[in-house]
Image (cartoon, helix red, strand yellow):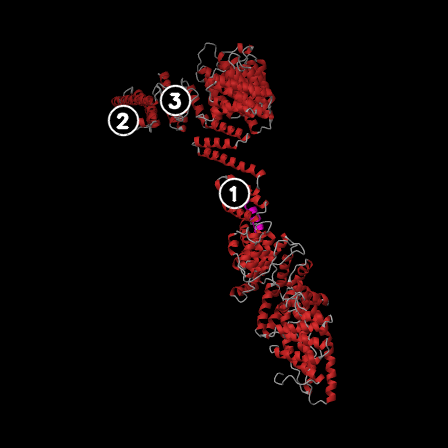
Amino acid sequence: MKLHTLTIILAIHLFSLLCFAEKNEKGLIPEVRMSNDEGENEKKALRSELMITRSENKAIESLQSVIKKSKGSTNEADLWYRLAELYMRRSKSGRFFDLNRDNPMMKLSPFPIPNEKGSESVKRAMKIYSKIESDFPKFRYMDEVLFNNAFAHQQVGQMKGSHELYQRLLTQFPKSPLVPDGTLALGELLYEQGKFAAALEQFERLEKFPNSRVYSYGMYKAAWACYNMRDSECGIRKLVQVVKNNPALQDGEVPTNRHNLRKEALRDLTIFIGDSYPASKLYSFFEDITSGEELGEAMMNLAKLYDSHSRQKEMNIFLEEYIEKQPSGPNVVKSHLLLVEANETLKKRDLVLKHLTFASDLCRSDSSWKKDQKKDDITTSCEEGFRRTSLDMAKKWWEIWLKNKQNTEFSNLTQQLFKLMLDNEDPKKPDLKTRFAYAELLFQLGKFDEASAQYKIVGDKTTDDIMKHDANYAALFSKEKSIEKKSEPLKEAERKELAANYLAKHPNGKYATAVKFKIGHIAYEENNYPEAEKWLKPLTTIKGNDEIRRKSEDLVLDMLNIKKDYVGIKEFSKQIASSTADASRKNSMNKIQEEAHFTEIQEFAKTGDKDQAAQKLIAYAKEHGNSKLSQDALWQAIGILYTEGKVYDAAEMSLKYVQKYPEDKKNLDALKDAAKAYADIGQTAKAADTLAKIAELDKKGRNQYLEAAADIYVMEKRVKDARASYMGILSSADSKTTERIYGKLLDSYKNEKKSPEYEKLLNQISAKGIEPYTTEAMIERAQSLLDAGKMTAAFDLSMKANGRSVPAETRAAARLIQASVLEKEFISQSVKAREEKFATVLAIKTEKLDKAQTAFVTALKMSKDPYQQLEALRGIDRVYGNYIDSLTSMPLPASLSPDEQKQLRGELAKLTDPIADKKKDNDAKLKALAATVGQSATTTRAYSSISVDKTITPIAQFPTPDKLGVFLPASSDMTIGKVSRYEIRPNKTCNKTAVMTGDIAKVNTFEVAGNCYGSRQFDIVEKLGLELAKAKETRALGLFYASVGAEGKGYNDKAMWLIDAALKAQPEASPYVYQKARLTYKEDGIKSAMQYFEKVLDMQMPSTEMETFAGVKAFSEGDFSRAVEKFSTLQKDQLYTLNVGTLLSESYAQKGQVDKALAMVKDLIAANKKDNVDYLLEQAHILETFKGSPTLALDSYEKAFKASSAQADLREWLSKKIQFIKNQNKVGQHVISGDL
């Protein structure tokens, strides 16, 4: 009964362990199923459990009914005990349903599924066991009741109750056969709770029961208790005891639990002893307690343990001892392989190769070791273990090398390993997969010849069609790669053989077409084009291999290209394009057609006309607008146009290029070249617009190009564009640039100074305090106040401006305003006074002279501007003259006697004489400076300062700029002495149509220019010039005409810019230099222009204006003969117009030809009866000075008096002069009082 009960309990225990395991947990042995249909198995299990449950339920119900009827009977306790057993069995089914509660099969069951859980059945059994213990204390199977109840408590996790029950069993029933099992169970209970010492105590009690079936297991658990208490020696002793108590399995013997326990003990001994024994003692330890086969397994387990603990170095000690002492052991090869992995971890690759070599030798078919081993051991050690380890190692080393191909150590190791494996192969069963892998490695190492040889071996030996095909092709491909590295005749021959071999063995192989292509390609590379065409041309029509077809087509195209057969290229590429549905291929063929066309043009450009080449390129770009080559063609055309001097066309094309290809990196250079080209040929407006575009692209140089564009806009009078550009610069400008730009902004308003915008700009500059413009603005306002007669306000504001921290030359204008105010105060100061106020009035006049004179002198010193200096000198001259005149004619007090008045006059002369000397010195400076800027010393003659006993001589003045007409050449010959002038006639027809259409090749451009200028169609003259400037041969002439036209339109700055460009192209053309001189004279005065006029004189340009210029220059230098020579070439109307008639007559008189001088003056007076004051004065001067006849001169003075009604100061002087002559010569009165 007890044995039966124990069997049931153990079965339940085993089932409980299975039930409480993880659902997905599986052992090493595959799960055995009665059916391959898992669903069917589940159905069967469900039906089985339901039937068992129904039977158990019925049994329980029956037994419960019997118990009710047998209450108080002698077998009642037995009935309760049987009921408890039924509940324990019932718990098994309950656990089944617990585990399968969510199984869909449960819902499909035709029988009701029990709701009671397995644990509830166990608890029912526990309750019954407790009832038996309490109600039937004398029950004969009480020890079983206690044991089963303890086990049931343990099942539901009530460990404390379980412990107490096991303890009562052992205490109350010390002689029960269940004591060993109870002791073991109690020990395990304590062990699970981590109470290892108490558990060990229970386990060691089993030593009293050596014959018990749980004895060995108890010692095994005792060993683990010792181990957990860190007492390895104790644990080792216990395990050794287990090993010795359970003998090894003998040949033919069926394994039992005792053998399994021995095996587990030996396995665990490796753990225990590995922590406490040195590696050198491990072999001997196990040798003493194990059989031969167990010894090897122990070594294997130890090695795995040591490897997991990273103690690979120590593995070499005990494994090598095992290998040495057990050379025929079944685990020797495995030991070598473990040492391979251990030494690989230690990176001792020499030892890795050593052990792989040993393993390889042992695995040879003729090795003595192999003869002593079982077939299974050979399979696992050699066919599986050695091969797997070798391949794993090779793979690892291979991958390491792939990550760093500079580390050749691993590639060498991998090669050695492959050779080792292949040396060990069975000739009857060659390891072709490994050899294929070896060939792959050689290929990756670049050892293509060796790889090819290995592939060839595989291809020759393998019976696998796929491998044969791949190997044969790889052999060819490897040879191809070898030839790429270094071509040799032998290799070339081998390649052909391999190609032939592939086609022979695989005529329809995957790569057959590719190999045919290869043969054709080889012929192509050998320049054997007929042979190449034989193989390749058929491939251009194949279907199913687009890549080969395309490559063949490409090679055929290339051969046509080599032959420079551009027609063939066009036709064949057209054929390809029409036969393909591939849009990309079609496009590429079209591209080839385009390239052939492009190449044709390139060939033409090498030897043909460059202009035609450029036009062909432009036409090509238009025809193939979407081609990349069209961009290249357009760019190349631009370059040719520039080279050929057609810079306008090049610039225009550059703008189109930039517009068409906005993302091209060359655009900035294209625009820069275009801007320069436009500038060089006078297309200033286009140059400015192009510079603005450059500013948009060139972020770094933006301000530089924007400013250049704005400067040209000003020149073009596009002031709004200019101002917008200038303002665009200010946002990112430094202080120096800001100052310059504001200056240019102010200059742009020079003709709009009364506009609100100009005032706003001035206020903006003043608010920012930008100098010198803030000060200049104040000076400008002060000047406006002065002009408005607001003297005090003008003086105060100019005083404020003069006090600012700016250079003296900037403040000079303010000082001149102050001087002007002081001058007016000085002049307005009267000198009339009574005797007692006379000295005071004289002192005030003298003081005001000093203030005014000081202001003018200071301004003179401060200024660097010759015009300001001239104004200061003139101011000094005026105040000196006024002071002298005022004191000379100062009314004397009537209270003084004649002698006193005479004496006073003498005293006043003492004041005026030094001033007169200063005035004389100042006058010399004034005249010298005036001459340098082409002006007279005074803006009007200071007649009041001329003594009546003197005469008025003519002033040597160059003709004003407006009197100097343009000089248009009559031909393109600019050689000195050969330049001729085209006669401009105002009524000639301007050929406007030819100019506007650009059709000027067949017209006389000199005539067109002259006639259009004469008819004042200056825009046509400019347009003509710009058309001529487009051609390199007529560029200088064109720029000259453009300058003349621009000047005529009032664009003086542009005219200057254009003539500078013309002179840059042709610096020695006198008409161009003359144009430069005229413009400079007009803008900067005669001083700046003098160098150019003198150069024109040296060039002997036949010009009335220059003859006049030379005459004035000679007159001013006192060379009257040369002056007569130059002026004599002029007509009477020219003498009058150029205002040099008086100079000619004066020159004659100075030479002693007085009568000729008088005759000249007489003719000029007769020819110009309205405005002849200067000629009458000259006539009077000659008569009085050179003829010595004031009386004869009197008539001329009187006529001049009548003609000078608009000149009050001259009339006053003439009145005095006439009276003086009459008084001196007692001449009769010719002048009536009314005229005076």
Q: How dense is the environment of label 2, judged by Cα within 10 Å: few (below 14), some, or many (20 and up)?
A: few
Q: Is residue 881 above or below residue 396?
A: below
Q: What residue would you read off at disc 2?
A: 112
Q: Where's the N terminus, which quadrant?
A: top left
Q: Nearer the viewer, residue 535 or 498?
A: 535
Give x and y (percent) for residue 699. 55, 50
**Disc sitting over residue 13 in the figure:** 3
- In the rendered structure, are the residues bearing label 1 and label 3 in contact, judged by CB atoms less than 8 Å apart? no
Q: Quadrant of residue 99?
A: top left
Residue denoted by label 1: 618
Residue type at tag 2: Pro
In the image: residue 556, left or right of residue 354: left
In what element is the residue under mark 3? helix
In terms of secondary structure, where does tag 1 sit?
Answer: helix
Residue 851 visible in the shown view: no
Distance from Cα at disc 1 to Cα at disc 3:
99 Å
Could you say which is closer to the camera, residue 840 or residue 1203?
Answer: 1203
Q: Residues within 10 Å of mark 3 (few under 14, many from 20)?
A: some
